[in-house]
Amino acid sequence: MVSDRVEQWRAVDGWPYEVSSMGRVRRVGGGYVAFSHDRKGYPRVTLCASGRQWSTFVHKIVAAAFIGPRPVGFAVNHRDGIKTNNSGENLEYVTPAENSAHARSMGLLARGERNGFSRLTELQVQEIRQRVACGESRRALARAMGLGKNAITRAASGETWGHVA
């Protein structure tokens, strides 16, 4: 989301830093702060002052400055689903359930083969379900596929891979 608004700067509580409505961070009287990214791709900054340091997510300090304090139990949501768009107008406070529902609706969850920990493909899950429905034992199927019996049972029942027809 691109805004026609003028970039606004607000103080980061308790630190000699400012955060902008466009999601930038700068030291008061100094330069801009470089971002790093966590393993999920969210921008982070490390703020330093008087021998203290604080590593935090950019979206959290932008939300605090431009929306207000985060209610207990709430999360910061990126309305457009883009983790690097930390403009104040793109952020909102939501419950964890709302955050999960939003991620699902935007197709942001790494389900199935997109999940880096997945050991199966959708075709294998369909094959497992078909073979179990035809009476093949889960133990024999697990041996044949090099998987644990629990993985076969959970895939066959839909406990995992529930999105696969």
Image: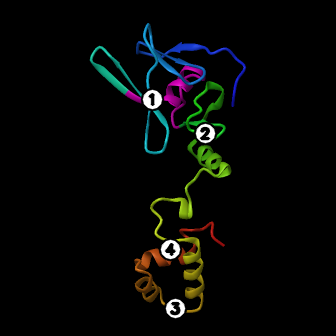
Q: Which mark is residue 154?
A: 4
Report the Cα–Cα distance between label 2 and label 1. 16 Å
Q: Which residue is mark 3?
A: 136
The mark total stands at 4
| Residue for badge 1 | 35
- x 59%, y 37%: residue: 77
First-in-chain label (2 vs 3): 2
C-alpha separation, residue under disc 2 versus residue under disc 3: 44 Å
Q: Earlier in the sequence, mark 1 or mark 3?
A: 1
Q: Nearer the viewer, mark 4 or mark 2?
A: 2
Q: Secondary structure at mark 1?
A: loop
On the rendered structure, is 94 left or right of 48?
right
Picture quarter containing residue 78?
A: top right
Q: Position of residue 73 (x, y in %)?
A: 52, 37
Please identify, in this view, whether the residue under mark 1 or under mark 3 is nearer the observer.
1
**149, above or below 17, in the image:** below
Residue 53 occupies quadrant: top left
Residues at marks 1 and 3, CA–CA distance in whole angstroms: 53 Å
- Give the vertical position of 84 relative to 34 (above or below): below
**Is residue 144 located in the magenta-colored stretch of the structure?**
no
Mark 3: give few (<14), some (14-19) or many (20+) Cα within 10 Å. Answer: few
**Disc 4 on helix, strand or loop?**
helix
Q: Earlier in the sequence, mark 2 or mark 1?
A: 1
- Asked if 87 appears above or below 145 in the picture, the reply is above
Amino acid residing under circle 4: Arg
Residue hosting label 2: 82
Q: Secondary structure at mark 2?
A: loop
